[in-house]
Every structure is written in structure tokens, then in C-alpha cells.
Image (cartoon, rainbow, N blue to C red):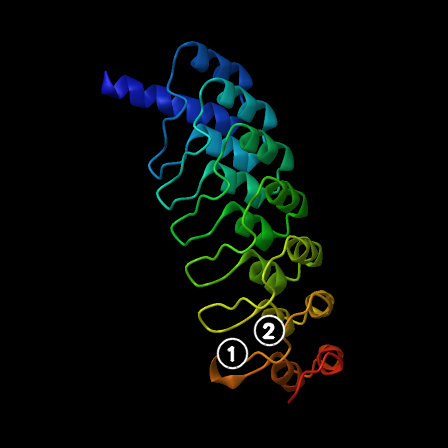
């Protein structure tokens, strides 16, 4: 009996992986457990969400798919969709009461996943749904730090408008401004300065954003920082 259940569970995962709606519908009608997971805990709904299959996600939710399922690393269905940038699926999951505040084993939220990947549409949806713009991962990182370090200016702007703390710092005392400076993202540096970021904060070792900009030869960023009152 257990072997048959496992086989049917594998069939539903295979159907989703192959995008086979016909087989999926038959398996759902036969009462196969739509929430069965693979060896790592990934469910059919997680697979469909990561792949951007709106039709399959809709069918699985209607069949009782758990929108808050998580794998062995704590990654949820919403995180999978958010990372992939599938706004329509994120909206469906939020409407189905997916937990927008859930965290994986590293303390990362769906908003952080979306911010890291520069998924501006998803970031907007999550913020509108009440996602915490100031949530921190285990290293102290926030969504704003993630987006700033990657140079996702549109996302940075959204987070700033959502009152993300521009002076928050991680366990190494690095701020969003320092990270943007280190990676040479001039447009992000300007957004953060305009939002009131402290240009004279110091990271571990006493380094400031200006020190990094000067040392790296980033004259455009150094100029912006000096104009904002940064001191060497």
C-alpha cells in the first residue's frame, strides 16, 4: 500500500515537472496526495510555482495544495515563486493565504528572495500585501541590502518608499550604502543618499563608503559621497 502511494506521489511530481495538465487532472481526480514531496521536501505546488506554471498552480491550489509547504531548507512555495519573478503566481499564493513573513533556514523571507533577484513586480506585490521591509536574515541582511549590493535600483527605490531602514547594517557593520559603493552601483548610491543614508557610518575596521570609493578609484561615487558630507 505504501509503495503504491509513493508511486502515485512520484507520478504527480512527474506530471508537474513535465507540464502535463492531462495527467495531473487524472491524478487529482483519482485522489492522489497533491502535497506529497520528493526526497528534499519539494511538492508539486513548489515545482509549479518555481516554473511559473500558472495553470498548474491554480489546479493544485483548487485541489488542496498547501501554499505554506516548505522543503528541508525551509524554502516555501511563495519563496520559489518570488525568486522566479512570477508575479501572477505570487498574487495567487498571497490570495490563498500564503505566509508572506515565513523564513527559510537562513532567515530569508520571500521579499528578500525577490529583492536579491531584482524582481520588482513581485517586490511591489509583497510590499502591498504587508511584507516587512526591515526583516533581517541570520547575517543581519535586509531586503534593501540585498537589492543595493546587486544594483537593483528599481527595487531599492520601492523599499526606500516602503520605509526600509537605509542605515541598517549586517553582522559586519556593512550598510546598503557601503554595499552599493563596494559594487560600484552609482545609481543606487544616489538613491540611498537622497533617502538620507548616513554617509559617514563605519563598518568593521573603521572603513566608510568614501574610503572604499576612493580606494577603488570610483570617482563618481566618491564625488556623490563628498557632496553629501562624507569625510575621509
Q: CA distance from mark 1 to mark 2?
A: 8 Å
Q: Please report whichever mark, 1 or 2, sits nearer to the chain's N-terminal start.
A: 2
Label 1 secondary element: loop
Q: Are marks 1 and 2 in contact (CB under 8 Å)?
A: yes
Which quadrant of the figure contains the N terminus? top left
Q: Which residue is painted at 47% across and 34% down in the image?
A: 46
Q: Which residue is painted at 45% across and 28% down in the image?
A: 44
Residue 165 pos. (x, y %): 58, 62
Q: Which residue is painted at 57% across and 55% down in the image?
A: 116
Q: Residues within 10 Å of mark 2 (few under 14, many from 20)?
A: many
Q: Which residue is mark 1?
A: 203
> Residue 21 lies in what quarter of the image?
top right
Residue 201 pos. (x, y %): 57, 78
Q: Nearer the viewer, residue 147 or 135?
A: 135
Q: Which residue is painted at 70% across and 70% down in the image?
A: 193
Residue 81 pos. (x, y %): 55, 39
Q: Which mark is residue 3?
A: none
The residue furthest left is 1
Q: Residues within 10 Å of mark 1 (few under 14, many from 20)?
A: some
Label 2 secondary element: helix
Above or below for 87 versus 111 = above
Which quadrant of the figure contains the C terminus? bottom right
Above or below for 27 versus 224 = above
> Residue 39 lies in what quarter of the image?
top left
Residue 55 pos. (x, y %): 59, 23
Q: Which mark is residue 178?
A: 2
> Residue 124 lies in what quarter of the image?
top right
Please tell me how many numbered marks the rendered image carries.
2
Above or below for 62 versus 130 = above
Above or below for 193 versus 70 = below
Amino acid at each position: 500500500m505504501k509503495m503504491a502511494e509513493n508511486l502515485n506521489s512520484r507520478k504527480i511530481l512527474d506530471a508537474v515537472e513535465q507540464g502535463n495538465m492531462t495527467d495531473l487532472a487524472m491524478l487529482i481526480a483519482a485522489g492522489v496526495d497533491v502535497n506529497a514531496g520528493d526526497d528534499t521536501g519539494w511538492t508539486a505546488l513548489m515545482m509549479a510555482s518555481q516554473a511559473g506554471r500558472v495553470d498548474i498552480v491554480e489546479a493544485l491550489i483548487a485541489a488542496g495544495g498547501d501554499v505554506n509547504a516548505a522543503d528541508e531548507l525551509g524554502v516555501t512555495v511563495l519563496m520559489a515563486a518570488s525568486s522566479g519573478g512570477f508575479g501572477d503566481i505570487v498574487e495567487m499564493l498571497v490570495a490563498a493565504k500564503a505566509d508572506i513573513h515565513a523564513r527559510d533556514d537562513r532567515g530569508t523571507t520571500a521579499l528578500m528572495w525577490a529583492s536579491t533577484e531584482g524582481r520588482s513586480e513581485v517586490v511591489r506585490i509583497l510590499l502591498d500585501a504587508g511584507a516587512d521591509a526591515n526583516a533581517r536574515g541570520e547575517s543581519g541582511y535586509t531586503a534593501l541590502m540585498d537589492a543595493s549590493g546587486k544594483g537593483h535600483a528599481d527595487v531599492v527605490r520601492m523599499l526606500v518608499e516602503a520605509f526600509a531602514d537605509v542605515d541598517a547594517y549586517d553582522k559586519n557593520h556593512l550598510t546598503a550604502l557601503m554595499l552599493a559603493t563596494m559594487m560600484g552601483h552609482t545609481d543606487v548610491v544616489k538613491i540611498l543618499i537622497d533617502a538620507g543614508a548616513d554617509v559617514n557610518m563605519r563598518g568593521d575596521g573603521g572603513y566608510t563608503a568614501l574610503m572604499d570609493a576612493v580606494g577603488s578609484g570610483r570617482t563618481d561615487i566618491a564625488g556623490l559621497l563628498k557632496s553629501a558630507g562624507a569625510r575621509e
